[in-house]
Image (cartoon, grey):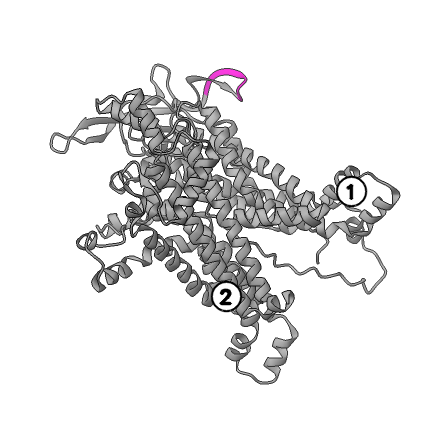
Amino acid sequence: MLTYIARRIVLAIFTVWAVSVLAFVIIQLPPGDYITSYIAQMAATGSIVTEQEAENLRIQYGLDQPIYVQYCKWMVMIAQGNFGLSMEWRRPVVEVIGDRLWLTMIVSFAALLLTWVLALPIGIYSAVRQYSLGDYTFTFIGFIGLAVPNFLLALVILYFGFVFFDANIGGLFSVEYQDAPWSIAKVWDMAKHLPIPALILGLAGTAQQIRIMRANLLDELRKPYVVTARAKGLSEAKVIVKYPVRVALNPFASTIGYLFPYIVSGSIIVSLVLGLPTVGPLLLKALIAQDMFLAGTIVLMLGVMTVVGTLISDIILVWIDPRIRLEDT
Amino acid sequence: MAGPRLSLDPMTITEAPATTRVTPADERIFVASQWQLMWWRFRKHKLAMVSGLIVIGFYLAALGADFLAYADPHTSEAQRSLMPPQPLYFFDAWRFSPYVYGIKGRRDPITFKRVYQVDANQKIPVRFFARGFEYKFLGLIPTNIHLLGVNEGLEAEKTMFLLGTDVQGRDLWSRLLYATRISMTIGLVGVTLSLFLGVLLGGFSGFYGGLADTIIQRIIEILRSIPTIPLWMGLAAALPREWSILQVYFAITIIISLLGWTELARVVRGRFLALREEDFVVSARLVGCSQMRIIFVHMVPSFMSHIIAATTLALPAMIISETSLSFLGLGLRPPAISWGVLLQQAQNVQTVAISPWLMLPSLPVIVAVLAFNFLGDGLRDAADPYGH
């Protein structure tokens, strides 16, 4: 088991490194650098930046050095906990991102949790009552969930909320709490706003998990040991929950690793539609303004966050599935 | 869609028939080719059949977009901004003669919004195969005949608004058809690129195994554990603003397929691993076939059907990706028209609440994605016609 976890951790470190390189490449890709867009911005407002000033700025931000040096410098800075300055906002990146990263995490985690809470009982129900009206209904909702891109779903829900309830159901906080410092009341306010974004983000995953759970459980229910348990006179609830559900749970659990990046990914675009104060809208703005440190940091942090989430799910998986443990020792 | 898919059907081996008498129906099955068996199996899957027809319909619409459209998708006119969809009446006094009512627009003096009123006195007959704007049918034959249109002397752009107009007063029906062309082909081009990468790397991984396999598998794992949308956004934001529509189109497909090949590679690798030790492959190797011959003559044909199914299942993700990117304003940019570009106008709830028809482009997205999913499921079931 330890070997397995160690291997996972090594892979996670590699992934983080790959993400950091990708993040850096993305930032370097656009033609020109921040200074070019800064000059253009200044020119638009009427002020002119001289060649000399531009050159000084480039040296100040280390833009005159070769790419790999810039990358190493960036890495060293991050290791020291310094994520650089957001050139667009003229403030440290960490300050600009602020609570947004945590909020992204909270929203994604809530979506993941909801996926589980919904998919597990519905999957079991659909398998046990195969071809019943309920099964068909859930299958239908599941297909819709898979087919509708989540930003469209957000748009539709927002539209219905607006037209029928005359309420803006977007956002993560009520107006009075938006800029308020954290307090119990603010957390409670957020908890009340959380279900809708969590549902929108989690629906596709839930649909997929229901199908996986249903398929696994159907395979298990046909096996002789279930018949034996039933013949022995166990209650139906015990027959199902105690044995086949436990076995069917394993492949189900192993998909969290893939689900989490997908949800984080989706949260970016859904946040834009619903106006959630996550890193999504900030990333879009930063990319458009070529705000190198900000965009890079966001991509990097999202990647790290996802990798850590996946790592945790992998460890949970070993813990609940003894077969993996035995395989590697 | 991310995540592995599980197949439901268990691979049961059919038992030998009790009687030795072979009915003509059995004989038909025994002599049928593999593709024939697949087709029979696929035909049983009604939902997949219907979905297949829908997909074909989408591609036909993409091919004949300019014929099916009646208005030039780029002609904008502030006077016709945000017109609601206009009902099309098929029967006039019990005779089949389709017509629409004329519409008058004016500016509301209080809200300054444009309001439109139906002019019940003015019936405008709708003609089939009418003349309209010039285009090249299938990109070859110059013509100006469209499926729908109005009488000579009138301009369709100014009289017919079957699905309403957008903020710039452009006809939504016509734009939707042009968008179908771009969105459906971007999926196809993207999936072809993904397929190339997937077959190359998955095949390499599965055929040679060892270190190459380990490295490629780790790369796939890494790619799958990174959230894709931020990466797409980053890559797409880097595209130079001055690039032409065609350049952006190909750049976007490359970006989408660069991250979308992993699932296909997984399928190909799985098939290679399964086939590598099969008797017919081993004997081909013993007879002295070259590796290329073993791969392309013996192995690839036997899992072609699996690749086709996996490709179909990969298409919806491509379509959704393009739509998402364009919706964010990082994908295709106007004047290019795609479903995502059209949906950009529906970003604001207030606008959508007043003009709900701006959300119409989401319907083809949903229908296309569903159809590809069902078709792919059917194809995957049919890909292995020897199971039960």
Mark 1 vs mark 2, CA separation in Å: 42 Å
Residue found at x 51% / y 34%: B253
Q: Callout 2: helix, strand or loop?
A: helix
Is residue B290 found inside the magenta-colored segment of the image?
Answer: no
Query: Relative to residue B4, is residue B199 depicted above or below?
Result: above
Range covered by the magenta-colored residues = B138-145
Q: Is residue B284 left or right of residue A35?
A: right
Q: Is residue B121 left or right of residue B199?
A: left
Give amino acid for label 1. His
Residue A177 image position (x, y, % from top left)? 19, 55
Q: Nearer the viewer, residue B89 or B178?
A: B178
Q: What residue is shown with label 2?
A: A316
Residue found at x 62% / y 37%: B196
Q: Is residue A274 left or right of residue A307?
A: left
Q: What residue is shown with label 1?
A: B298
Q: Callout 1: helix, strand or loop?
A: helix
| Chain for numbered disc 2 | A
Magenta stretch, main secondary structure class:
strand
Select label 1 or label 2 by which is in front: 2
Query: Relative to residue A304, is residue A328 depicted above or below?
Result: below
| Chain for numbered disc 1 | B
Residue B338 image position (x, y, % from top left)? 43, 32
Q: Nearer the viewer, residue B193 or B220?
A: B220
Residue B101 image position (x, y, % from top left)? 29, 28
